[in-house]
Image (cartoon, helix red, strand yellow):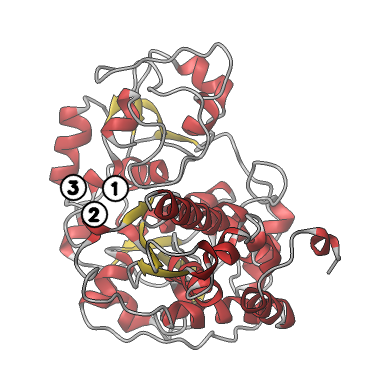
């Protein structure tokens, strides 16, 4: 693989580890890894389960996905706020679930500033474009941009 | 050595009963030599979560399309793909997938561009197989590569290009997208990604028959009489008509193409795969907005 991506903004260590895991497995196992992520997407807590009206739809994903973002403490000092992410996608949409699980594993519980610093094109570093197709990958970029926008909105509301 | 037809009474009503099999037929013939079952889904990982035992995966996006040009694979690429999947020219190929066989019908249409002699859809697709409690497997079958000849793709019979659609204006055309896309309120399917059309509406003269109307609740095709009521009654088409079908990128319209050509026996149906993502971006082609053709 080329090092072209190395010039982009560095990833937080957790996201970097995920990217490394994807890059380290051979092509044929990369989809399997994505499937394992999709199986590990945490279930929704009670306040969101069955309450899609409390979540934001992400229509850019091929199968609709719902997303909720919480920032705590809210209000609070900007440098001490952490972000929590919740995703709802059906079992029949494993690719979308896998993308959501990557973002959950890489960003949930991080500081708001760290989440906002995630480079928008980071999904291109996972080596999935040829296996999944760039069109399908756009869904992950859309989830990330919606997460960031919600974090900014939570801050502005304080 | 084609496998026998499915003799289920519902299929005998269709114009080409040899193009469709039931889940039960597949279950009974799974181990027959000469049969390859292939799953083709919208979601690229669904196959990996469990599939019909022995079925291979055929992905529309990463395998049937050319990676650079907006086109399908060529004869050499198709031969290579079929060979890898263990499919030879005399294999009975049965396709199935998610979402009412939407993507399976698309894959079937592509195999017909190369004239694969015996290809069939499994009625009801993945959803029906699962609903009936039939077994799923996560094992990827190891098939030995097959010999598949390089066949030139025939883009004349069942495929239409933009210029041909311009020349076809005024003749029968079916727009299979959602009502909002047809009228021009929406540029893409509700809840689906925007795939980049600059203008909304439909091709003048096209009748709106959303593709999923051909499917019953359980994802199977409706019986022939119900299909005739929709396409020949409501849309006013006749089996002798020269018909063009289109959607957004040509996938949903493959499903309708299958219904018209193979279930109702229309003689000349072409799928315009450029569809709205081409038409809605083209300079100076006519567009109609609103709910009337």
- Could you confirm whether marks 2 and 1 are on the same chain? yes
* Residue positioned 44% across, 63% down in the render: B41
> For the C terminus of chain B, which image quadrant?
top left
Q: Is residue B116 visible?
A: no
Q: Quadrant of residue B238?
A: top left
In the drawing, what numbered circle is on residue B221? Answer: 2
Q: Are marks 1 and 3 in contact (CB under 8 Å)?
A: yes
Mark 3, residue position: B224
Marked residue chain, label 1: B
Q: Secondary structure at mark 3?
A: helix
- Tell me the quarter of the picture where residue A126 sits: bottom right
The image's mark for residue B263 is 1
**A89 left or right of B142 in image:** left
Q: Earlier in the sequence, mark 2 or mark 1?
A: 2
Which of B47 and A16 lies nearest the eye of the viewer? A16
Spatial separation of the CA atoms under disc 2 and disc 3: 9 Å
Q: Are marks 2 and 1 in contact (CB under 8 Å)?
A: yes
């Amino acid at each position: 693989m080329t090092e072209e991506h190395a010039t982009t903004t560095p990833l937080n260590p957790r996201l970097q580890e995920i990217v490394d895991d994807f890059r380290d497995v051979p092509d044929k196992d990369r989809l399997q890894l994505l499937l394992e992520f999709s199986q590990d997407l945490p279930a929704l807590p009670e306040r969101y389960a069955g309450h899609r009206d409390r979540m934001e739809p992400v229509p850019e994903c091929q199968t609709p996905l719902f997303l909720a973002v919480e920032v705590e403490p809210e209000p609070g000092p900007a440098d001490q706020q952490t972000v929590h992410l919740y995703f709802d996608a059906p079992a029949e949409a494993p690719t979308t679930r896998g993308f959501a699980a990557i973002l959950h594993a890489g960003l949930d519980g991080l500081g708001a500033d760290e989440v906002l610093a995630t480079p928008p094109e980071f999904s291109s570093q996972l080596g999935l474009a040829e296996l999944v197709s760039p069109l399908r990958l756009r869904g992950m970029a859309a989830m990330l941009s919606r997460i960031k926008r919600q974090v900014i909105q939570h801050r502005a509301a304080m | 050595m084609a496998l026998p037809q499915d003799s289920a009474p519902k299929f005998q009503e269709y114009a080409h009963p040899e193009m469709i099999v039931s889940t039960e037929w597949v279950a009974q013939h799974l181990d027959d030599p000469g049969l390859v079952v292939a799953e083709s889904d919208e979601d690229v990982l669904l196959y990996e979560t469990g599939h019909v035992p022995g079925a291979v995966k055929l992905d529309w996006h990463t395998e049937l399309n050319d990676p650079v040009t907006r086109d399908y694979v060529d004869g050499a690429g198709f031969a290579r793909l079929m060979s890898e999947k263990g499919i030879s020219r005399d294999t009975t190929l049965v396709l199935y997938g998610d979402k009412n066989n939407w993507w399976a019908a698309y894959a079937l249409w592509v195999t017909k561009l190369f004239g694969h002699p015996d290809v069939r859809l499994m009625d009801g697709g993945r959803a029906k197989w699962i609903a009936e409690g039939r077994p799923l497997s996560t094992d990827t079958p190891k098939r030995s590569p097959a010999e598949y000849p390089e066949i030139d793709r025939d883009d004349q019979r069942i495929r239409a290009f933009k210029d041909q659609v311009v020349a076809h204006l005024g003749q029968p055309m079916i727009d299979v997208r959602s009502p909002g896309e047809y009228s021009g309120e929406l540029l893409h399917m509700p809840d689906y990604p925007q795939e980049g059309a600059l203008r909304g509406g439909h091709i003048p003269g096209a009748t709106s028959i959303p593709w999923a109307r051909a499917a019953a609740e359980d994802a199977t095709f409706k019986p022939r009489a119900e299909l005739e009521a929709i396409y020949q009654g409501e849309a006013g088409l006749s089996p002798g008509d020269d018909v063009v079908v289109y959607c957004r990128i040509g996938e949903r319209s493959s499903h309708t193409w299958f219904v018209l050509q193979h279930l109702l026996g229309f003689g000349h149906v072409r799928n315009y795969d450029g569809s709205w993502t081409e038409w809605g971006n083209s300079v100076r082609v006519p567009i109609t907005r609103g709910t009337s053709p």
